[in-house]
């Protein structure tokens, strides 16, 4: 019996020794891994009850595993979904912040314009009656142009305001001179004196500065909120690369394959994965921060000298003051206009028009009493709106550089033990250094393969959009629109436009009486100027001669070509 048992024992021993290294009669249970897999809605037939050979795994560490090939494929798809969800959540929070503030600011601004127009209309009807109603389209057009500018229309505020005062002067000039008849050409001549004679006092100049600065700042600020909303929205929809998906799966689901369902990724490991996956959005950070700083600068302007609420609220009072200035100085203004444009023809007997005084145009307009003023636009005030937006802007600064860390903390690494965490291959400390933000810094990322030579075009477009908007903000901060040259000469001295000082710029016009057209090109003196004509000096004569010679030479050269 002993002789027979010895060979049998030898055979059994050899059989046991020849078993594969992975074979273990006491394989670990995969019940918890299976339960979690099925809870995600995946096919239960994919998940084994006990560990199996992991030679089929392409991403996760091979060896004893609870993951079949089908499970690894499903986890790869789930990783892409998890990444997008993790990015979209904080982006949506920021996007909704900018979207809601833009909507509130837009509502406030439009309602402020509406209230200002209603206020002016109601008070002018009460003060000027039929006289205003007969000319109300002039004021309606004024507010239409302001609204058009705000919504992005091709409106030059300076030209629009100049046109408004010129048209108002034409209407007023008829009223204060009812005994004359005026042709359209004559009234066009009259309008040329608006800047030179200042019939409305200093109101047009001051209002031009105030409206331009306030509207440029308000429109640009609203556009900035809109751009921030759109940038975040477009960046949040960028798809992860295949290498990112692989790294995400290795970090979040490969521990499951090892049965480590409660072990969290190491924080630095997660940071490197996120920084690799968010390499392109990381490049937004510098321009984003510049944009936020520019927005905060314009916000300060809106709280102070460029406050559109303080400009629009009393605009009816300011325009009425200008009208009264014109009436009080009508005699002097008319005399100077008659000197420059010629004596107009009187109306035939019996056709004398009604004068301004005949229609009750003789009382200075009064401002609202505090209790009479319209309800605050959109149920709030500009100061409260801007203060709220400023707080949100400060919170949004460095959003893109902090995004990897916030995603890791909020989704995977909160409370992780750095000595007992998943490092990508085992339950142990993560030893690699954390990479910087942005595409170029991922060249040595140990966990995500990133092609730093191929920047994402959507991200580059958003960087350019932020850069353009930042430049607009800087212009708005100085009171300048991108298509507007500021002529401000107020004491703030912050305008950077190339306009000249109204006191130093020439206000001379070359025109003759429109009743007797004259085609002579002789220069006329400004109205009211009784100085003798100065003879040109020898130096100026020689300079002119030299310029004429140069121009003739250029013409000759062009003909020779």
Image (cartoon, rainbow, N blue to C red):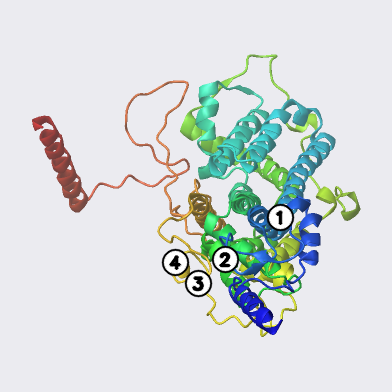
Disc 2 versus disc 3: nearer the observer: 3
Label located before the other in sequence (1 or 3): 1
At x 45% / y 71%, what residue is drawn? 444
The answer to which of 85 and 252 lies nearer the viewer is: 252
Q: In this figure, which residue is indicated by the disc labeled 1?
A: 92
Label located before the other in sequence (2 or 3): 2
Label 3: element kind: loop
Tell which residue pokes out farthest to the left in this image.
560
Whole-angstrom CA distance, mark 2 to mark 3, is 28 Å
Q: In this figure, which residue is indicated by the disc labeled 2?
A: 289
Q: Relative to 5, is 273 above or below? A: above
Label located before the other in sequence (2 or 1): 1
Label 4: element kind: helix
- Image position of 34 (left or right of 304): right
Label located before the other in sequence (4 or 3): 4
Whole-angstrom CA distance, mark 1 to mark 3, is 30 Å
**Residue 514 percent across, percent down from the top left:** 46, 24
């Amino acid at each position: 019996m002993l002789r027979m048992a010895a060979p049998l024992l030898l055979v059994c021993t050899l059989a046991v020794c020849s078993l594969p290294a992975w074979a273990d009669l006491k394989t670990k249970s995969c019940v918890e891994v299976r339960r979690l897999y099925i809870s995600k809605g995946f096919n239960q037939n994919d998940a084994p009850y006990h560990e199996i050979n992991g030679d089929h795994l392409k991403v996760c560490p091979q060896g004893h595993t609870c993951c079949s090939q089908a499970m690894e494929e499903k986890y790869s798809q789930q990783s892409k979904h998890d990444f997008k969800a993790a990015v979209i959540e904080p982006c949506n929070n920021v996007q909704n912040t900018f979207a809601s503030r833009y909507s509130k600011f837009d509502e406030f601004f439009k309602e402020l314009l509406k209230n200002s127009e209603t206020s002016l209309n109601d008070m002018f009807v009460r003060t000027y009656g039929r006289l205003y109603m007969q000319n109300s389209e002039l004021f309606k057009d004024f507010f239409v142009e302001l609204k058009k500018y705000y919504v992005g229309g091709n409106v030059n505020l300076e030209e629009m305001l100049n046109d408004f005062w010129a048209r108002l002067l034409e209407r007023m000039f008829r009223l204060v001179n009812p005994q004359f008849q005026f042709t359209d050409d004559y009234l066009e001549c009259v309008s040329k004196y608006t800047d030179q004679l200042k019939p409305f006092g200093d109101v047009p100049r001051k209002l031009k500065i105030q409206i331009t600065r306030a509207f440029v700042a308000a429109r640009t600020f609203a556009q900035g909120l809109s751009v921030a909303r759109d940038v975040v929205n477009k960046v949040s929809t960028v798809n992860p690369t295949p290498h990112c998906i692989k790294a995400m799966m290795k970090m979040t689901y490969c521990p499951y394959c090892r049965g480590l369902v409660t072990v969290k990724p190491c924080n630095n490991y997660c940071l490197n994965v996120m920084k690799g996956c968010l390499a392109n959005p990381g490049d937004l950070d510098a321009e984003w921060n510049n944009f936020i700083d520019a927005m905060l600068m314009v916000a300060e302007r809106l709280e102070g000298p460029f406050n559109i609420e303080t400009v629009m609220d009393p605009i009816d009072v300011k325009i009425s003051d200008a009208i009264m200035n014109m009436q009080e100085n009508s005699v002097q203004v008319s005399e100077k206009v008659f000197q420059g444009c010629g004596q107009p023809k009187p109306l035939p007997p019996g056709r004398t028009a009604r004068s301004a005084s005949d229609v009750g145009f003789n009382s200075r307009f009064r401002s609202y009493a505090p209790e009479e003023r319209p309800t605050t636009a959109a149920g709030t005030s500009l100061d409260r709106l801007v203060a709220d937006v400023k707080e949100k802007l400060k919170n949004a600064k460095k959003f893109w550089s902090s995004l990897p860390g916030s995603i890791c903390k909020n989704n995977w690494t909160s409370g992780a033990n750095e000595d007992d965490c998943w490092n990508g291959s085992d339950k142990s400390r993560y030893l690699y250094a954390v990479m910087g933000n942005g595409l170029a810094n991922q060249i040595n990322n140990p966990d995500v393969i990133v092609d730093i030579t191929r920047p994402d075009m959507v991200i580059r477009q958003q960087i350019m959009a932020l850069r353009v908007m930042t430049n607009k903000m800087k212009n708005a901060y100085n009171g300048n629109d991108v298509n507007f040259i500021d002529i401000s000469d107020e004491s703030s001295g912050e305008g950077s436009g190339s306009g000249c000082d109204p006191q130093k710029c020439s206000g001379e016009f070359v025109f003759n009486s429109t009743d007797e057209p004259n085609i002579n090109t002789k220069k006329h003196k400004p109205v009211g100027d009784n100085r003798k004509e100065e003879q040109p000096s020898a130096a100026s004569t020689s300079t002119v001669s030299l310029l004429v010679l140069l121009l003739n030479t250029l013409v000759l050269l062009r003909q020779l070509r």
